[in-house]
Image (cartoon, rainbow, N blue to C red):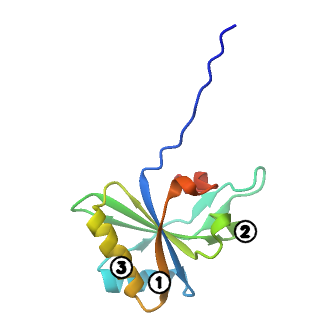
Amino acid sequence: MNRKFLKFEIDLDFVLIAVTTSLKDYRICYLINKYLNFNFVKTDDLAVDIHPGAPSVYFSLYEYNWEASETDFFFIGNKGSDGYLIPEMKKADYFLMIKNYIDDNDLDNLISALNKIPEIVAAVKIDPKKIKSRENLLF
């Protein structure tokens, strides 16, 4: 009997930046808007089913769109109502997810601009393929 195996690979077509800061989500988004000329707007919290059979865990979510390049930015809290979005990265307070295309120079400039904000301890690019709980980032 012939057997065929279906290999399923998740398409992670986004850039992920881990942000560490002690500020609340609305305050850090205000500073990013101010220093980087972004316009993050609060949207409905992101509901993620982290524990099977348990209620969803909610994470704060902000959204911004660069209309010139149709690039979408999402600012997501790592600490939610009942757990972490990415449990293996508990030191990261927030994640900046960039969907669609962003130029490498623009990305480097963005990371260095984030690191220049005095209230941000660190902003580091993360490879989403190396994160065990990467399924939580698919929405």
Q: Secondary structure at mark 1?
A: helix
Give residue 108's position: percent from left, percent from top. 33, 71
Circle 3 crowding by C-alpha within 10 Å: few under 14, some 14–19, many from 20:
some
Amino acid on which the number 3 mark rests in the picture? Ser
Please report the residue visible at 39 percent of the width from the left and 80 percent of the height from the top. Answer: 114
User: In whole angstroms, how far apart are the C-alphas of marks 1 and 3?
Assistant: 16 Å
Label of residue 82 in the image? 2
Q: Secondary structure at mark 3?
A: helix
Residue sitting nearer the eye, 83 or 14:
14
Q: Depth-wise, is mark 2 or mark 3 nearer the camera?
A: 3
Along the polypeptide, which appears first: circle 1 or circle 3?
A: 1
Amino acid on which the number 2 mark rests in the picture? Asp
User: In whole angstroms, how far apart are the C-alphas of marks 1 and 2?
Assistant: 21 Å
Q: Residue furthest right?
A: 53
Residue 114: tell me if it is visible.
yes
Q: Which residue is mark 1?
A: 28
Circle 1 crowding by C-alpha within 10 Å: few under 14, some 14–19, many from 20:
some
Label of residue 112 in the image? 3
**Placement of the N terminus among the 4 image quadrants:** top right
Disc 1 to disc 3: CB gap under 8 Å: no
Please report the residue visible at 63 percent of the width from the left and 55 percent of the height from the top. Answer: 133
Q: Secondary structure at mark 2?
A: loop
Q: Is residue 115 left or right of residue 7?
A: left
Amino acid on which the number 1 mark rests in the picture? Ile
With respect to residue 27, does 126 lie above or below? above
Disc 2 to disc 3: CB gap under 8 Å: no
Q: Is residue 77 left or right of residue 34?
A: right
Quadrant location of residue 30? bottom left
User: In whole angstroms, how far apart are the C-alphas of marks 2 and 3?
Assistant: 32 Å
